[in-house]
Image (cartoon, rainbow, N blue to C red):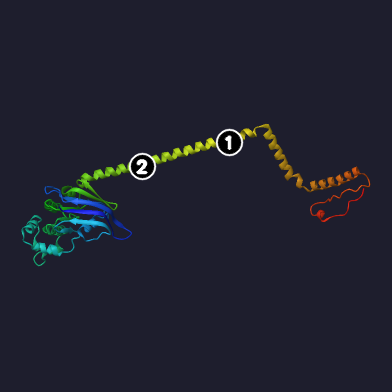
Amino acid sequence: MVSVHLRGLRHAHTLAAGVLDDVTLDLAAPEPAEPRPFVGVVGPNGAGKSTLLRLLAGELTPIGGTLEVQATGPVRLVRQDVDELTDDVRGFAWQWDGVAVRLRRRLHLDPDDLDSRVGRGWGALSPGQRKRWQVAAALAEQPDVLLLDEPTNHLDAAARDLLVGVLQRFGGLGLLASHDRAVLERLTSRTLRVHRGRVELHAGSHGEAAPRWRAAEQAERDAHERARRELRREQRLLGDVRRDRHGAEVGPRRERRLAGANQPDAREATQVRAAQGRAGTGAAGHPDARARGAGRGRRGVVRRAARAGRGARVPPRRLGPAGAGRGAGGRPARRW
């Protein structure tokens, strides 16, 4: 049984730009009676479709994972470019076995066209004619795995019909990378979607599979938006709870302070403290106040002397403003 198996396959053209990442895939050849024997390979330009085909053909080596192709016959890749006349096409032109003859007849190919001495030569052929020669040469080898990279890029409607009719008879495992939706519908029964470094296998042609993955993506976007809205709602609820809790804690304290300030004793104490503050910062520091204080001190000495009686010794009391030398000693007090 012809099959392809990929396990965790990774590939990158540079260390900074990965193309395929962690690709796991199993593909097997379809039943012989399948009218659409190919697997479509779809995705935007640069997604890695050609890279995947070249990996399967052995032209590129993955940087990680494993790739196994189980086949007894050859694996053939038909690339996009048609500039060069290759040895396999030249050899096929002059093969006269039944397979080669039938293919040339069905695709309207004349070997003389490749010889510039007799016909027009390869350079004079249209790109569509060159592509038919390339596909026919690959089919003539009767490969088990056939990899086609944009085979209808240069074909007109008539040539496309010829090519599709031949490819529908292919009996191996075929992969067809193409943007041609009409050809995909006629040739493919499964679809590989190369998207954001991943490869997804879907049943049906592109037209059958695309609505399903688009619906799945839309459902994922809707779920993400619902989750965002729910998160914002929960954040608002949490903010409301915090504000309510803060109000419940602060309100009673504010009420107690207001109630205490309205009591008579509290008002009187507040007024007394305010008056003391004004007295301490106003009159006490004025020079006249200091002079009055000094005068009161001298009168106090006289009154004490009078009480003690004339002739009694009165303890000295040092008077004077700050810095006048009261702390440095003084003369004895007078006797009154």
The residue positioned 22% from the left and 45% from the top of the image is 209
Disc on res. 225: 2
Rendered location of residue 176, percent (x, y): 19, 53
Q: Is residue 54 above or below residue 234?
A: below
Q: State the separation of the CA atoms marked 1 and 2.
A: 43 Å
Q: What element does badge 2 sit on?
A: helix
Disc on res. 253: 1
The residue positioned 58% from the left and 36% from the top of the image is 253
Disc on res. 212: none
Rendered location of residue 279, percent (x, y): 74, 42
Rendered location of residue 117, percent (x, y): 9, 67
Name which quarter of the figure residue 58 lies in: bottom left
The residue positioned 14% from the left and 65% from the top of the image is 87
Q: Callout 2, which amino acid?
A: Glu
Q: Is residue 242 visible?
A: yes
Say whether residue 262 is left or right of residue 10: right
Q: Callout 1, which amino acid?
A: Arg
The residue positioned 8% from the left and 55% from the top of the image is 106
In terms of depth relative to the viewer, which is nearer, 328 or 170? 328
Looking at the rendered image, the disc whose residue lies closer to the viewer, 1 or 2, is 1
Query: Extreme right residue here?
Result: 311
